[in-house]
Each structure stands twice: as C-alpha cells, then as structure tokens.
Image: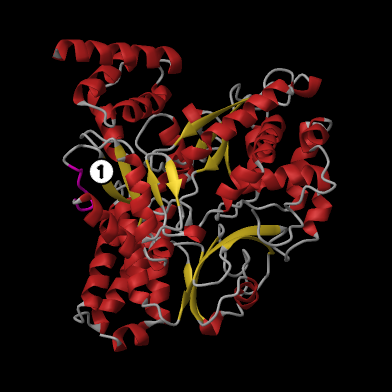
C-alpha cells in the first residue's frame, strides 16, 4: 500500500494503458516517453526514452526486455509494493516497451527474497494470456510478446544491470565492462533494455496520462513523482509517493519523524545527510535516490550504522575487481579501528582518499558507491564519533 | 543404496533439463529447483548438471558458491534467515536473534542436530518498514519480537 494520496500511482480515471499504447506506432511511443523526460527509477536515473530509442535503432533480430525486480538496496521496498498492488501495470509496461523497441521476449528478474510473490505474479501473467494482453497477437494488433519470471538467489550485486544479465545467462553475478552497454550487447549478446519495476509502471501510466501531463510534475531536471521507502526512526514508516524536489524536512514531517539527526538518502550506498542539510531536496539535481530513505534519531550511534553498511558491502562485493574487494575490507577495518579508539586523523584521511579512489577505479556501481556512506558519515559526524571513544 | 539415490538424482535432473532446456541460461532454474528439493546441490548433482548442459563442472560449482541461496553443503529442512540490515537492526533484531539461539540451542551459522533448522543472517530483504523480519524458507515473517519468533519456530517443529 502506498501510504499517502497518490497522483501518479492512482487508478482513478486511468485508461487502458496497454490498448492506448498499442494503438500508436512504436515511434510515437518512443517520442512520448522521451518528451516525458522520464528517468530510470532504480537510482541511476538514465533517461528511459534514450535507452529505448537506442535499442529500437538496432537492426538485430532478437531483442529483450528485462524488468529489474532485484530490489536489494538496504531500505528499499517500494518495488515490493508495486509488484503486490500494480502487477498488471508492471507487465503492461514491459509489453509496451517491447512493442516500442521491437522485442518479442521479456524477463522479470525477481529477487529470491521475494519468491513469495511468485505465485501471484504468475497468476497475473496467466490472466493476461487469457485476456489476450500477452502472448500471440496481443489485443488483435498482430504483436507477439511473452514474459518469463526468473528468480534471483540472494546476491545484491545482481541489481547492477550487467551482473543481472550474467545471472540470467546462468553465470556468477559479476558485472561486465561497460561499454558495450546492454542496449547493444545484452542478454545472449542481443540488444536488451533493463529497467526498474517503477520505471515500467510509470511508463505505462504515461501512455494514458500523456507525456506532457507528466512533465508538469516534479522539478526542472527531475520530472514526475517518485516512490520512496521510508524506514528507521519515524512513526509512520512505509512507501510514499512524493514529488521530486521535496525537502528532507518536508519528508520527515510527512512520516512523523521526531528528533532526527541523520537521514540516509539512497540506501546503504547513498549519502548520509546531517541536520544542517535537511533543507536539501530529493531530486536528480540534488540528493538522488532509488527510493530508500532511512532515518536515524538522536539516540543512534552513527558509527554502528556505518559498520552495518560496511559489513554489508564486504559481504556483497562480488570480488572480481580489487578496489571493491579490498577497499571495502579496508574501510570496515577502519571502522573497527575507530571503535577501538586507535584510528589517527591521518589514517582517517587516508581512508577517505581510498574511498575516493574506489569511486573512480571500481568496475561497477557497487564499488563506485559503497564509499559514499563512509565518506559522508565520517565527514558529517566525525566530532560526535570521536568524542564518544 | 547409494546407486539408487544417484539414479534418482540423475532422473530428476533429466526431468528438469527437459523442462528448462540445455542452454546455459537454464542452469540457474535447474539448480534452484535442486536446492529447493534437497536443501543443497551435491557434488554429484553439480557434475550431472554440468554433463547434461555440456559445461565444465567448475562452472556449476562457481555458480553454486556465488549465490547465498544456493549451497553445496547440507542445510536444515527449514532455513531461518534473519535480516541484519540497519532498519531491522534498529527495530530490535539483536533480542530476536538471541531468543532464537536460546530456543534452538545453536548459534547463527549452525544447524540443529536433528537437521531441522539452519540459522543464517540475511542482508536487507525489503521488509524495512516492518522489522525485525525473517524468512523461513520462502515464507516471510515481520514485526518479530522474542516471543512471536519462538511461537513461529514452534509451528515448524
């Protein structure tokens, strides 16, 4: 359930997204998504229209659509809510994108932790097949598209699109070098678009409400509304629909958080904002997030929080590139040193430099973003952390 | 005896290969099925999958050891996975963990002597608004307290 009143994720007066889309030609769908300025909802924020157009431009015979339902970022659960409440629109979004780029097959990569949703998702597919909204000759428009659900097996890194494709192909979930990007060389070497669950639902809704309507929501560079998953120290944790541009303070009020001293925006790999930064905005221009917001009140020890995050990254690093495999270990050891009270300021500076190097040198988003909590927490809470030890 | 067991495993894998195909991308669904049915993917099963998909056994071993939901060692019939990520941690994971350990008489990372329960920690399972949370095989339990978690485990005993 989305906790507040939704504008974007609202079924009232929503037309038949799939029928509306299939009545257009693929080119018009691509233009509409591009004009809506929809950016990827998984966190990276790549323009969806551009991604689809690149895949559509390819002359390859086989193309694939992949729905990234491997929501693993700590503190994120909005895709779980979408898969429970809007499974029809998730799948319709996949069909629409397939029609737009010229693909005949789609995969949903569902994280193993959500396997309890598998039955109802398969039932939904079954229902769509019966209603001719999936399969052969969809809605009598002569377009064929099938969807298969594949389960993940408990690996955070598989949320990274190339690691996800490796996993789909039956390999260890180790990220590939990019370029080539999946839109050129994706599943089995074929052009593949990988989009987040929320992106597919939003794209389907745009088909009915129109790209122009969508651009009226949000800020200059961040159009539309975003689902955020709020957890931690607040009275009303849950999934909320917020306009881009909302400040942390406004959000805290919405979820009834008292005495907040820190807000982690974007999950374990995100930025930890301190009280002085609560006027900052949730948007691609300022603090970007795939949906995770975690709140910490005055009673929390931020070093304990940081330790929790660094343990997570040490466990979840796939281990193929050195900056991530060794770097995260070094940062965790640093946290332990600080805990024991024998980390010098010079060594802390070195660790922060190491973090910056990891951001540049790591192969995929995991190692490129895992130093972010270390750097932001140690910068924003250095005095507090050292004074307690 | 061992031969019959192995023959049964071979037959099972043949059936899975019939369902999912012999291409490399069938590997994950096949071994996920074996994992669910047997609580592990034995050396023999890995070799049989490799033989039938025509890949090197090391490739299969590499996959089995990469994913935390796949295992090459035996596990209990019920795998209890308690979320240890920060939101569940702040909601009282520690007290729940200790209650589970005391109740079953084993620590996290271990399996009970009757092979019924294995205790593991899991990273964020997306129930952060309802922590502390855990999975027992593929069933989700949320808002745990030391008392409710014990009641839940008793249902599986």
Q: Is residue A23 left or right of residue B116?
A: right
Task: Locate residue A166, reporting x and y percent.
Answer: 42, 35
Q: Is residue A149 left or right of residue A131?
A: left
Q: Quadrant of residue B95?
A: bottom left
Q: How many marks?
A: 1
In the structure shown, which secondary structural element does the residue marked by tag 1 occupy? strand
Name the foreground residue: A370 vs A184. A370
Task: Locate residue A317, reporting x and y percent.
Answer: 33, 51
- Please, is residue B147 above or below residue A83 in the view? below
Name the foreground residue: A356 vs A85. A85
Q: Quadrant of residue A108?
A: top right
Magenta region's main secondary structure? Answer: loop
Neighbour class for label 1 at 10 Å: few (<14), some, many (≥20)?
Answer: many
Chain to which mark 1 belongs: B
Name the foreground residue: A68 vs B80. B80
Q: Is residue B122 visible?
A: no
Residue at 30 percent of width and 46 percent of height: A320
- Please, is residue A39 above or below residue B41 in the view? below
Q: Is residue A226 visible?
A: yes
Residue at 62 percent of width and 68 percent of height: A282
Find out whether residue A163 is within the magenta segment: no
Report the span colored magenta.
B106-112
- Please, is residue B144 above or below residue A183 in the view? below
Find out whether residue B107 is within the magenta segment: yes
Q: Is residue A310 left or right of residue B47?
A: right
Task: Locate residue A148, reporting x and y percent.
Answer: 55, 27
Name the foreground residue: B57 vs B16. B16
Identify the residue position indicated by label 1 in the image.
B118
Task: Locate residue A198, reporting x and y percent.
Answer: 63, 48
- Position of the C terminus of chain A by quadrant: bottom left
């Amino acid at each position: 359930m989305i906790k507040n009143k939704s504008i974007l994720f609202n079924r009232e007066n929503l037309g038949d997204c799939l029928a509306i889309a299939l009545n257009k030609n693929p080119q018009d769908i691509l233009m509409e998504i591009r004009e809506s300025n929809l950016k990827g909802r998984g966190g990276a924020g790549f323009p969806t229209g551009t991604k689809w157009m690149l895949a559509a431009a390819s002359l390859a015979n086989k193309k694939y659509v992949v729905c990234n339902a491997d929501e693993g970022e700590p503190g994120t659960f909005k895709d779980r809510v979408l898969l429970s409440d809007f499974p029809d629109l998730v799948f319709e979004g996949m069909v629409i994108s397939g029609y737009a780029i010229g693909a005949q097959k789609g995969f949903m990569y569902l994280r193993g932790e959500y396997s309890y949703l598998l039955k109802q998702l398969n039932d939904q597919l079954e229902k769509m097949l019966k209603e001719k909204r999936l399969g052969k000759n969809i809605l009598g428009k002569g377009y064929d598209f099938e969807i298969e659900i594949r389960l993940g097996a408990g690996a955070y890194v598989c949320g990274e699109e190339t690691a996800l494709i490796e996993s789909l192909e039956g390999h260890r979930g180790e990220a590939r070098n990019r370029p080539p990007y999946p839109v050129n060389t994706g599943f089995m070497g074929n052009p593949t678009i990988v989009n987040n669950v929320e992106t597919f639902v939003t794209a389907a809704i745009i088909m009915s409400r129109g790209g122009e309507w969508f651009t009226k929501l949000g800020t200059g560079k961040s159009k539309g509304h975003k689902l955020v998953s709020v957890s931690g120290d607040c009275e009303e944790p849950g999934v909320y629909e917020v306009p881009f541009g909302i400040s942390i303070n406004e959000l805290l009020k919405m979820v009834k958080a008292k005495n907040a001293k820190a807000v982690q925006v974007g999950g374990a790999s995100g930025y930890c904002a301190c009280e002085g930064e609560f006027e900052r905005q949730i948007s691609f221009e300022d603090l970007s997030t795939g949906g995770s917001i975690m709140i910490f009140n005055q009673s929390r020890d931020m070093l304990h929080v940081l330790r929790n995050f660094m343990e997570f990254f040490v466990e979840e690093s796939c281990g193929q590139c050195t900056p991530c495999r060794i770097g995260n270990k070094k940062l965790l050891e640093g946290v332990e040193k600080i805990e024991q009270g024998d980390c010098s300021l010079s060594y802390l500076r070195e660790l922060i430099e190491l973090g910056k190097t990891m951001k540049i040198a790591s192969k995929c988003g995991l190692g490129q973003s895992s130093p972010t909590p270390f750097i932001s927490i140690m910068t924003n809470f250095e005095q507090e952390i050292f004074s307690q030890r | 005896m061992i031969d019959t067991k192995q023959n049964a495993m071979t037959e099972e894998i043949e059936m899975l290969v019939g369902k999912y195909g012999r291409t490399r991308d069938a590997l994950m669904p096949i071994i996920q099925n074996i994992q669910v049915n047997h609580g592990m993917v034995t050396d023999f099963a890995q070799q049989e999958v490799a033989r039938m998909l025509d890949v090197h056994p090391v490739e299969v071993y590499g996959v089995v050891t990469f994913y935390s939901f796949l295992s090459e060692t035996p596990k209990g019939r019920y795998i209890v996975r308690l979320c240890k990520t920060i939101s569940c941690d702040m909601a009282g994971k520690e007290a729940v963990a200790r209650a589970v350990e005391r109740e079953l008489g084993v620590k996290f990372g271990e399996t009970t002597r009757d092979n019924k329960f294995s205790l593991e920690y899991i990273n964020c399972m997306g129930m952060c608004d309802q922590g502390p949370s855990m999975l027992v095989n593929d069933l989700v339990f949320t808002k745990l307290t030391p008392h409710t978690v014990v009641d839940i485990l008793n249902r599986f005993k």
